[in-house]
Image (spheres, rainbow, N blue to C red):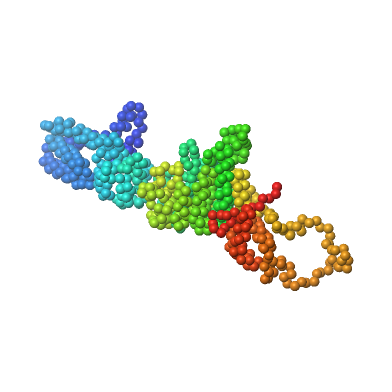
Amino acid sequence: MVENHVEQQYEVQLQGGSDAAGVGGYLLHRAKPHIPPWLCAGGVGAAGVLGNLAWANSAAAGVGLTLASIALSGVTWWAGKSTSAQRRLHSAITVAGGSAWVTAAALAGPTAGPLGDLYLMGAPALALSWNIRSVLRRNTDGAAAGSDSGLLEKIGLAKAQIGRTTVEPNRVTAKVALEPGEQTNEDVSKSLARLASALDLPTSAVRYMPSPDSARRGELVIVPEDMLAQPMDWQGPSNLGGSIADPLVIGRYDDGAPLMLWLPGDPEIKRNSTHLLIAGGTGSGKGETALNVMLEILSRRDVLLWLSDPKMFQDFRPLLPGLDWSAEGGTSTEVMVEAIRAVIPARTRWLGEHGYRQWIPEAAGRQSSREHTCRPDGRPCGCPGMPFVVAWAEEAANTLRAMGDDAFTGIAQEARSAGVSLIVSLQRPSYDQMSTSTRASLPSVVALGCDPRDEGFSLPDSVLDAGAHPGAWGNRKPGYCYVVSPGIPEDRYPSPARTFAVPHTVTDEMAALAEWAQHHGAAADPITAGAARSVAGNAYTGRPAPGQTTTPAPLRQVPGGHDEEDEMQEAEYTGPLVDPEDDGIDPEAELPAGDPGDDTPLWESPGYKPSPEEARELLAHALAEFEHAGQMVVGPKDFTDWCDRHNLSRPWVSARLKEAAAAGRLAPTTAAGRWRIVPVPVAA
């Protein structure tokens, strides 16, 4: 089996090196694999002639040549014990016949007696027998007709047949046909570890891709050299100024091919838009993988990136100026999630009105084409374009714990058609972290090293059966990963890859890319920005303009509330406010000192409990303060200090929050006991 495999590689390489041109070149190209036996036959004849010139009629030479012939035949028989019986016998007969003729020709002469006729008949016959064996090694359907079973027998697949083999740089692909009725593709998948052991290769170097049309056929892929052992540093964006619809290059495969993934869909080639899960244990390179994807996203002209990171942007701080929205986790992430939910229907409505069944790059430009119009008269509307949106939840386990394991379920199920891609990054995507519905709605995954018991949470069973084994890496090989995503050929799914290393020395390059995004990246369209602000209010500011920083909007007035400081600033000054009847009062004299606490509002006085009307007014003020600070999701726990200060209980606050929800000032969220503040419209 091993000899067959090496011989097939030799034949493929020999054929691939031919410069066949014209009929003669074609014939030579086809004949090359069959020439070696004829060269051996010619060599035997030349050896007989030269031997006769040196040892004619020499008794000593006769003894030596006879012993050499016997020894050579015995060695051939011994060396062939690991091959099939047919090949062993064929080889021994060929060597014995050739060496016997050389001995006789050297002693008596190549034309003495029948020796000349024996050579003319025997040498071509043996050469042709090897040519016939080579031809019959493969049948018409590509399966091997007589391949050796030594190696396959060791791994429990003795009756399997190896067919056509393709040799590429650092990659060998062989067709496999199993015994009908006795073996299935599942048997090969279970034998991959033993096959890797027999070839002295790591488990990840051997994988098997079953044929979708047969239960007993597939392709065996062997990558003998790990080209990922030496990390490759990030060299900058792959397509600066390109579209987000173009591939994102984030690393390379173990055979040197680029590692690419796509987020938007492409209706022309029937590729679906996708959401992405990045999963890997501590130390597996999850942060660098995220950096690779973010750097590629920020280098595109038609995409907005919204990022939530409970780690306070420890890895991503140089990129903040290029983000359209950033949230540091906790309540601000709750606001972002609620805003995404509101953005999805607004975007799908706009896309539908302009004739888009899904987001494509044309949707990001101004709508000047008659093919995409929302005007009833059929004329181009000239509406601003709508960029793609990537909503990224870094360390999403924190968000899922705070908002529930199905926090992203609705987004994941509905966002793709709205031109929104959800990226969720966490260490362990198990069912106690996120709901099964959310996991099922994340069709793409970058699976980095993990605990072997967690492999099934990251990768589909079919990819694991084909040889993928991220548990073999753990945290020992940062950046090693398997990628499953639309647009990637399925035979690449079980192929190991490695993301680019992003050293700390490229911080300036990262900051420069964020600055490029400020100047040349997409700005939020009115539909997306309006829907986000309708939920997030001041919390959503959009990407800051170059050289500018975001500032919170002024405090909005709430019904029944007032801001005394603003009223004093707006009042026109007309001199000292003194009653005309108080003529004897010196307006410049200092007022007598009052008792401590005289300037404290009545409802903040110790022991004072505000009336129901005062308490409702206080609640309105509190909600306005939360909105001004950008905290758009609240619950009773956020009012703990407020309740203590105003002598109110949490149950009373819960009841008032429900009243505010009934009045439209609050809206429920997916988390029990949490309410979203509805921004008060600002008068035009």
Q: Where residue 539 sits in the image (x, y, percent)?
A: 62, 53
Q: Where residue 430 sits in the image (x, y, percent)?
A: 44, 55
Residue 46 is drawn in which quadrant? top left
Looking at the rendered image, the quarter that the N terminus falls into is top left
Is residue 276 placed above or below 22 in the rendered structure?
Answer: below
Left or right of 554? Residue 147 is: left
Left or right of 242? Residue 172 is: left
Q: How many dots with numbers?
A: 0
Is residue 129 placed above or below 669 in the rendered structure?
Answer: above
Nearer to the camera, 550 or 179: 179
Residue drawn at the location 80% of the way across and 71% of the way down: 592
Residue drawn at the location 58% of the way across and 63% of the way down: 637
Nearer to the camera, 166 or 542: 542
Q: Where residue 639 sits in the image (x, y, percent)?
A: 61, 63
Nearer to the camera, 90 or 406: 406
Q: Where residue 520 sits in the image (x, y, percent)?
A: 60, 44
